[in-house]
Amino acid sequence: MAKNTAYDFYGIIEDNVVLGHRTPVKGSPNIAVPEGVVKIWRRAFEGEYCKSVILPSTLKIVDNEAFNHCSELKEVIIPEGVEELGPWAFNHCGALEKIHLPASLIKVDKKNQPFNNCFGLKEITVDEANPVYCAANNCLIEKATGTVISGCRNSVIPDDGSITAINEGAFCRQYYLKEINIPNSVKSIGTYAFLNCRSLKEIVLPESVKKLGVSVFEGCDKLEKINLEYVERIEKNAFENCTSLKGDIVISDRTAKIGTSAFELSGISSVTIGSGITAIEKGTFRSCHNLQKVVLPEGLVKIDKYAFTSCENLKEAAIPSSVKYIGDAAFWGCKLQNVVLPPEPDFISKDAFAGCKLATKIARKTSHPDFEMDGSTVRKYRGKDVNVVIPEGVTSIKAKAFKGKKKIESVAIPSSVTAIAASAFEGCENLNSITVDDGNKKYRSINNCIVDYKNKTLIFGCNDSVIPENGIEKIGNGAFYKCDKIEHAIIPCGVKAIGKSAFEGCTGLKTVTFPEGLETIGDSAFNECMNLETVVLHAGLKEIGEHAFDNCENITDLKLPQGLKRIGAFSFDRCKKLKALDIPEGVEIIDLHAFHGCDEVRAISLPSTLDYCYNAGFRLKPKLEQITVAEGNMKYKSQGNCLIYLKENELWAGCPDSTIPEGIIRISNYAFAGSDLESIVIPEGVIYIMNSAFENCKKLKHLTLPQTLKSPEGCFDDSVNLETVNAPARFRDYFVKLNAKLKFTATD
């Protein structure tokens, strides 16, 4: 640990990069980063209790979330020389009052702007010599695009024609912003731009603004007025929870879309919807408790599920004759009394008007008695035929429409079908033949596979399928789900992605040939393929998804390629026969329990590129003999056969032969869980041992604890076979309760 005499600095520095910082309880709230530092690593100061930070003149980069949730930070001077502020660099620094940006700054993350959720900001300034950014009226502006990147409680958007856009999250959670004028020059307002601006009462939108982004005014619970005359698109959640937005809302004829939950939980009393709207989307007006009247336009085709659910004061809503579809609980809980249904609907859910007194009965079409239809969509097959012919005129097949129909042997799909859900034929164990009409413009049947040839995706296969060699770039989600009779799968060259659950539950699968050029293996792609023995992956692969090879208990050989970036959570969980883990250079992320249950693994090597390794990624202790980390890794190191997280001097994983090195402060969750270790000496300096660190260490007999440890309670509850404990006297009662026969020796 380095320490500065003027201010305090309790951090880890490697290669002039601050990797982490943790101020002790008695430390100063003022931090000075030493000269020579060129970069502050992502999350290095996250959650620190600091009021003032001095940054060095040598600094170039402040990385992602570097000061995230430093809620007490009031003052930080960004020095000349800093060139980049990463995403959310000062996110949730609510006490920060002013910020000045130097002339050297040339890169600010626009999508996740660095001062997001800094609701205490009063002043934003930029050096006049900066070539990329400027400040005007307490707004941070990108010169070239005229975009307001960040604002604060005292912002006034310049009305000189220079501003064309308001950035994503520009004013997010500016709780004290009471008013803002949007100039006529602004053409777009980004996602979350005014999210949770809880003091904002009125917004006047100029004619130039045609689109309102996702959640743009969500949570503005003081907002009373909004004009939508010129808006053409209202994205999802745009006015959600605007509880003070009352009175009449008029959606003009020029508006073509109102997104999901756009006005959910708003306070509006009536809404008139223009002729440009053909669909009311899911939950658009859900729980608008003051809503009494709705005027729907002729030409409206669809009222989706939950559209007006729990609008308990809604008494008037004439359903246009053009409506063909009314979804589940669309008007559930409303006070509609006289509802006239359209003359020829395709589908009206049985729960659409639950609690309402209908003037007419729900009409249901029964032209295809073996199929439960939703308009031209097959929702469920109810027939008993072994050979199924889907009727001409059907346009889509819903997920799980044929689920569990074990006796079906063949399916014929007509030319009219344009959409087939990923799991449409799930559980059709005896399906051996699947064909598509030659006139179908989207799908083809090749080698008993359904291929979306426009998107070059194999969307479904069966037990007798052979994956086509040409024209396939993706094996779709659930394509071979539980086709348990497949023994060998050859993925042809040209395939770049294997989708979610593509081969999940193929219990008969023994071999898979993976092609060069494959880039991603989706979540659960080979989950429960219990007879799969060897996995050889090639250069070009970038990501292995969550649970990708979970419970492939017979895999003995695993070869991971150079260039792989991410190994997802539980990806090789329960691969019980795997004996070695050589993680190649290039891997940056190993997620939660990635190798949990790989009980035969004896050695693991980690690359210098590893940036994030979930501390429970290697719960594979029983026979583990060696842990190594390549030199040059800036986050982790191996010492004494331990994996150490440098940022917090935390031991993340150990094995029976581990020797805990000096300098460790904390022993993390699952660090030794399930290990066959028989004795362990915890050195002085260790303050915390997490509850599950020694979980299920049944062979642990001898234990030595330091004076610095705060408490052992909960850490050794499963270690019932302890014979000797050397520890401070204050821990005696705890260990005696665990095992009255153990020998306790006080070390103080």
Image (cartoon, rainbow, N blue to C red):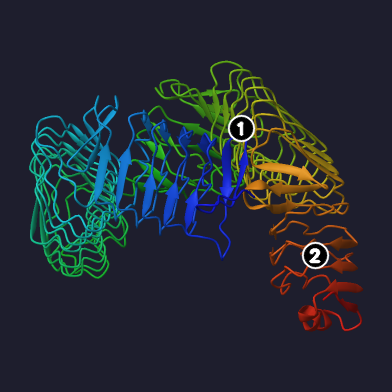
Cα–Cα span, label 1 and label 2:
32 Å
> Which label belongs to residue 565?
1
Seen in the image, is 666 located left or right of residue 207? right
The percent position of residue 508, horizontal first and vertical second, equals: 75, 39
Q: In terms of depth relative to the viewer, which is nearer, 724 or 18?
A: 18
Looking at the image, is 747 positioned above or below residue 485?
below
Mark 1 and mark 2 residues within 8 Å of each other at the beta carbon: no
Query: Pointer 2: residues within 10 angstroms few (<14), some, or many (20+)?
Result: some
Whether residue 604 is visible, yes or no, is yes
Query: Pointer 1: residues within 10 angstroms few (<14), some, or many (20+)?
Result: many
Find numbered disc 2 in the image and state the secondary structure of the residue it sits on: loop
> Which label belongs to residue 696?
2
Find numbered disc 1 in the image and state the secondary structure of the residue it sits on: loop
Looking at the image, is 683 positioned above or below residue 715?
above
Whether residue 720 is visible, yes or no, is no
The percent position of residue 190, horizontal first and vertical second, equals: 26, 40
Seen in the image, is 125 located left or right of residue 421? left
Q: In which quarter of the image is the C terminus?
A: bottom right
Quadrant of the image occupied by residue 493: top right
The percent position of residue 489, horizontal first and vertical second, equals: 70, 28
The percent position of residue 723, horizontal first and vertical second, equals: 92, 73
- Amino acid tagged 1: Lys
Quadrant of the image occupied by residue 169: top left
Residue, far top: 470
Seen in the image, is 100 located left or right of residue 242? right
Q: In terms of depth relative to the viewer, which is nearer, 126 or 459?
A: 126
Looking at the image, is 514 positioned above or below residue 601?
above
- Amino acid tagged 2: Asn
Q: In terms of depth relative to the viewer, which is nearer, 46 or 81?
A: 81
Q: Tell me which label, 1 or 2, sits earlier in the chain.
A: 1
